[in-house]
Image: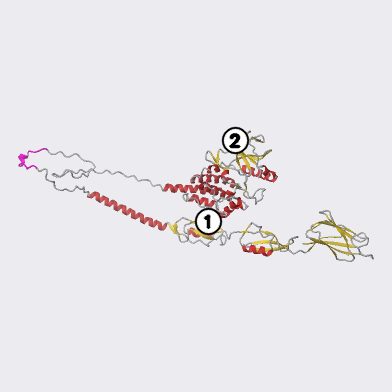
Amino acid sequence: MPIAPDLSGHALDDRYELHAVIGEGAFGRVYQGRDRRLARPVAVKVIKPWWTEDPDWVGSFEREVQLLARVSDPGIVQIFDVGHADEGLYYVSELVDGENLASRLRRGPLAPWDACGVAAQLCRALSHAHAQRIVHRDIKPANIMLSSRGRVKVGDFGVARLAEGSTDGAAATIVGTPKYMAPEQGRGRPTTPATDIYSVGVVLYEMLAGRPPFAGESAVELALRHLQDTPPPLSVRLPPALAENVDRALAKDPAERYADGAEMADALVLARRQATSSQRNRVVRPRTRTASHARARVLTPAAGGSDDAPTRSLTTRAPRQPPPPRDRAATSPPRRPADPTRPAAPMSPRRNVNPPARRRAVAALGLALLLLASMVVAAVLLGRTGHTRVPGLTNLTRTAATASARRQHLRTVYRTAYGPAAAGTVISQRPAAGTRVTTGAAVHVVVSRGPAPVDVQLVVGEGTTDARDALKQLGLSTTVTAVPAPGIRPGTVTKQSPSAGRDAPAGSSVALQVAETPQWRPLTTFQAVRSVPFRITGTRWRVVYRMAYQSDCTFIFFCSGPPTAHIANLATGSAINPFSLGNGTGRIQTFQSGPGLYQIEVSPGHDTARWSIEVDDYY
């Protein structure tokens, strides 16, 4: 592919200065610039010159930029202007102060909830474009700007199209970046907001894992992997709700993804809110113990006891003062002093016995046990009234399944999938029938969309029998119509509907048009001396003449004298040798000159002969 010139230092339309290249894509090169008229920094994308050689493409591009300029949202890079200068087609947008996500990911993956926040902002911005039926079609880290204020902005809607089809471009044109391209994009199918959701899922996967889910050496290999392979599982340490968001966004079937950016943004916010609430509930607050003040008990030694007896009090009281000495001589005879070496009698520690306190403790314990027993009974009773069993919903219609679940006070959450059952029939449920669940719980139900559509095979150019056998193996029936087909072997399929690559309902019919056996087909008839120009389609053709005359002379056709016919090939300017016809009627002249534009001129004789000429084509 040729290299676009570097326009740094130029000023487009003498207004937009181009300072330095800050990015480049398949469609154009982005410059940091300045708007001279408004004296503000801008980003200018100049489309590469070979794209502007097609006037229809240029007109389509300008109309689409005008549509995108109407999308006003803080999360989308705002488009200011579009123009066509001598240097080429361009458009002007706001300049975001920050870096793109691709530069950030080169430093490693993001923390799970940081990645969730970026994806939620991205989806919220895309939801405003989706609301106006605009699909980005090229969501990738290089097109996602992270401003210095933490805002996410989506840029480069260069390949965006209206969700219901491009204004001019062919529907089968494949645009986008293969590493982030949805399966239906790789097959050239129409794009929808769900196409952007798949690309957001790839970007979210890369933010969490540090790499995209699929890699390949070619665009074809990448497209096939997105179409057929299952993404490698993310780390088990990631929040389960966030991993489920990624799985749904990366569903192969667009109908199983989030419908648009708004739905995915709400799901991401809900996942983070639930995870935060769950983490808050797991926090255990430490119990505070109330210090009890023990009563001080003083253990004094008994008379004559040992001074080493253990003390059981936390505080000690001052010892009692001995009573004043009395005159022992007056009261009793003198006693023999105690022998200090004689051991004292053994004593056990004093115990404080408090029967009222013991009774209060026993009563408190009994009350606690009674309260605990009441709570157990209440839990059992509540468990009996707060639970129900899941009914069997398989093979029911969606309406019947909803009614059956409501009778058991359960909610139903539906999604659709292809299956052998008739469309609208429940083919699976989770939890299974008979499972005991909490009243009000959700039952996830899968409703059949009918058998999966069949990718119609190309059979044009095949014989009728081979074509019918090939389509029969795909579960498709056929209807055959014989049609004229000049130059094609009889029995060859010339056209099929639906055409190759289209999806057809299983068991439906494919209409085949088959070349029929060639035959003579009247093309034109004339009685004048000159025919109107006629076109021969087959490889050969013929002239059939009839005449009647009243004369004694011998009839000679196509001449002044002997009648002759002159045939001219108007396409090449050449002439076919004239031929003469003898007496009689119903004569035939056959020619092998092949397809072309011809005209016959008759030179009549001098008699009263009347003639008519018919031209037949053979195909």
Q: Verify CB contact (< 8 Å) between mark 1 and mark 2.
A: no
Q: What residue type is labelled 1?
A: Tyr
Q: Mark 2 points at which residue?
A: 41
Residue 291 horizontal/vertical position (percent): 30, 43
Which quarter of the rendered picture does the N terminus lie within?
Answer: top right
Look at discs 1 and 2 and give the one toward the viewer.
Answer: 2
Q: For residue 415: magenta?
A: no
Q: What residue type is labelled 2?
A: Pro
Residue 216 horizontal/vertical position (percent): 57, 50
Separation of marks 1 and 2 at Cα, in angstroms: 50 Å
Query: Image point 84% across, 55% down: which residue?
Result: 574
Q: Earlier in the sequence, mark 1 or mark 2?
A: 2
Q: Main secondary structure of the magenta part?
A: loop
Q: Name the residue under label 1.
A: 414
Instruction: Name the quadrant containing residue 53.
Output: top right
Instruction: Name the quadrant containing residue 5.
Output: top right
Q: For residue 330: magenta?
A: yes
